[in-house]
Image: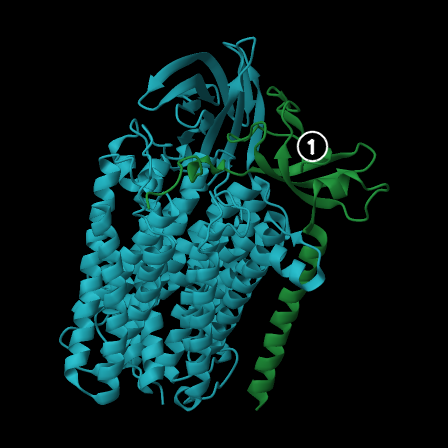
Amino acid sequence: MSELGRLSLLLGFACSLFAVGSIAWGLRTGLSGPLRGGRRAVWAVCGLTVLAVILLERALLARDMSYRYVAEHTSKDLPLHYAFTSLWAGQEGSLLLWLLILSAYGSAFLFAYRKRLDPFYDAVAMVIAAVMVFFTGLLSFVSSPFRILATPPPDGMGLNPLLQDPGMMIHPPILYTGYVGFVVPFAFAMAVLLLNRSGTRWIEEVRRWTLFCWGFLGVGILLGARWAYIELGWGGYWGWDPVENASLMPWLVGTGFLHSVMIEQRRGMLKTWNITLIALTFLLSMFGTFLTRSGVLTSVHSFAESNIGPWFLGFILIAATAATALILYRKALLESENRMDAIVSREGSFLFNNVLFVALTFATFLGTTFPVLSEAVTGTKISVSAPFFNRVNVPIALTLLLLTGAGPVLSWKRVTASVLKRNFVLPAFLGVIAVLVALPFGATGVYPLVCIFGAAFVITTIVMGFARGIQARKSAETGALPGQVVSLVQKNKRRYGGYIVHAGMVVIFLGVLGSSVFQKEAHGPLRNGESLKLGPYALTLRGVTDHQRQNASLTTAIVDVQRDGKFVATEHPSKAFYSKSQQPMTEVALHTTPMEDLYLILGGVNEDGSASIQAYINPLVSFVWVGGLIMVFGTLIALSDRMRLRREEKPVP
Amino acid sequence: MGNRVRLAVLSLVVIAAVGYLILTGVKQTGMQYMTVTELARLDHAPKAEGFRLDGVVAPGSVVYDQREPKLQFKMTDGKEKIAVVYDGLMPDAFADGREVVVEGAYRHGDRALYASKLVTKCPSKYEAKGLGKDKS
């Protein structure tokens, strides 16, 4: 069976190569036969990859320990669902998942455009196939998941306990759906340059693909944060770890692109910039995969050093060079059709937004790779961590928050003083009120107050945006308010979907503010019946128990939680000892309420029978997850907009 | 042209501001990589405060007070040893002989690194040696 797996990947490699060559030939000669052949080869890669995945899954589920990958990542006592998801527990399997999603995108692309006879779409498929060449090659020749052991062990080494978590079952596929998806916008951009195509139609198509993967990437990042919060047991969800940064960077550039693409659609400006952003988003998602897997930087996620780093770096360099060369070669195509009229305008705010998103990405990139860069430049290796990112990124992010309020209410081209007054006085006023309300609650410091002001400001502008829209349509329709909101959103899904995404982001900002600035902590050893005070909470130890689970034994502290003297819950923070790894695993107990999380860690049981408990109050953490859900909702609305350039959105002359 | 100039000025202001944040950020929060040997053989207090050390937990050196919680151990690179003090819970993967990365302030008087961050590298066991060779 393993030979069949190897063969399917090898055939996949051959088919990808064939697809690139055949389509290139077809484009050159104008013959439709080679184009059709190339497209079929892309379909074939998808089929072969699915076969390889099924074969590896079969081995994982059967715990066939003759497979090196199975022996490394599973054990016989591993629950079945984790055996299934250990496909993406290691490097080879993760790469196979990458290829699976990539080839699925390739097929989805071909299916979506099957009725278009324009060779442009073949060129896009060719670029996707070129990326497939890299991954099928890597899986065939460098990092094969189908390696067979000379002497199969009686049992495997088990799955890393950190990965035995429901969140880890879905986090990688969702994150990869985002990461990998940026191949499609990249392929569109390269095809435009290769064929020297003008026009804005492709830009609308790229916007939709980007929005789709951007949404998945965002969800993937939040799921990763959620996983870190529950599994890593340090009381937080974001630590500016290299791997976290790696997933954030393409998201940031993608966000910038989703904004600046609107200027291109409306005014025919910023073409070079947009193509650069698309290419950068793709390259950064490749770089993210490289960081996660190469072991170049120390990270909580780098489980091993590996041999694929140079290959990835080489691929990124080649892709970057090709993209840069093409952009320079087609400079004339990317000539701007308009000039900016005024800085204080919608275009101006989007441009500013883009500069800030790129700055944020740049600072994150610099901080992440600083050890490598500083060593290369000065010879001294210097690393920066969370304090650096908080210092640099927080002010940039807050400026972006303010801009989120300002941008959408500025008009295109030019803004008059009366418009400024009409749109800004009320939000600014409510922003100040919000700050005054927050002060007695202990909010101090410039950044928290700016954040509160910004949040109120943005929410007000969003509500005003909805209100104006309804007012403008009053004459046409009457009815209950909810119905009017729904029909308003339906009329312009892109705009109002975007507003909803903004609202979700504001909620996330508030969650981050609450949980970072207002976190409270207490710890101590507790004997039976003793209590620990933390804010309004009293935590009383009721006992310690031991019990056995399928592949682990658990020590659990039973803790009664009282809030303001009233019993609210019994929580069970635990330590698990997985039989395979002989290593403790902290299992956090979470008591979640809308306004705050109580986060309990069992440090251990002492000789005298007391339990060491560490407790945190994390205010507003749930806002981070709820904000994420709101963003997903808004993204779905914006995605459901099927109409191309509507009358009101025709390019402004 | 007025707009182009204004735009250029605005971009410059943003670049300068971000550059300033990055430079001061590195200066104030940067941690210099050192080997255990380099740090242990210093004969005077170093100019910089923040250091980052990679090394291995010296077997038998771990003293853990779970109640505080306070973790003390010696870190080694095979040649020298240096004392590390960390106020916090012992990370799950922490154990004798494990690879750790420590960031914190070095106090020459105590010859100890007061760690603000302690990362335990996951034992390479999970992706590992020990399974022997591939079937050829």
Name the residue: 42% across, 61% down: A286
Q: Is residue A15 left or right of residue A203?
A: left
Answer whether residue A595 is visible to the viewer in this image.
Answer: no
- Seen from the viewer's position, the closer of residues A98 and A91 is A91
In the figure, what tint was chain B given?
green
x then y, percent, for residue A235: 51, 35
Q: Which residue is mark 1?
A: B84
Chain at tag 1: B
Q: Residues within 10 Å of mark 1 (few under 14, many from 20)?
A: many
Answer whether residue A603 is visible to the viewer in this image.
Answer: yes
Name the residue: 31% across, 39% down: A70
Q: Is residue A450 left or right of residue A484?
A: right
- Seen from the viewer's position, the closer of residues A630 and A195 is A195
Amino acid, disc 1? Val
Residue A639 in which image quadrant: bottom left
In the picture as drawn, the residue positioned furthest to the right comes out as B44
In the figure, what tint was chain A given?
cyan
- Seen from the viewer's position, the closer of residues A209 and A243 is A243
Total count of labels: 1
Where, quadrant-wise, is the C terminus of chain A in this rendering? bottom left
x then y, percent, for residue A587: 43, 28
- Seen from the viewer's position, the closer of residues B52 and A273 is B52
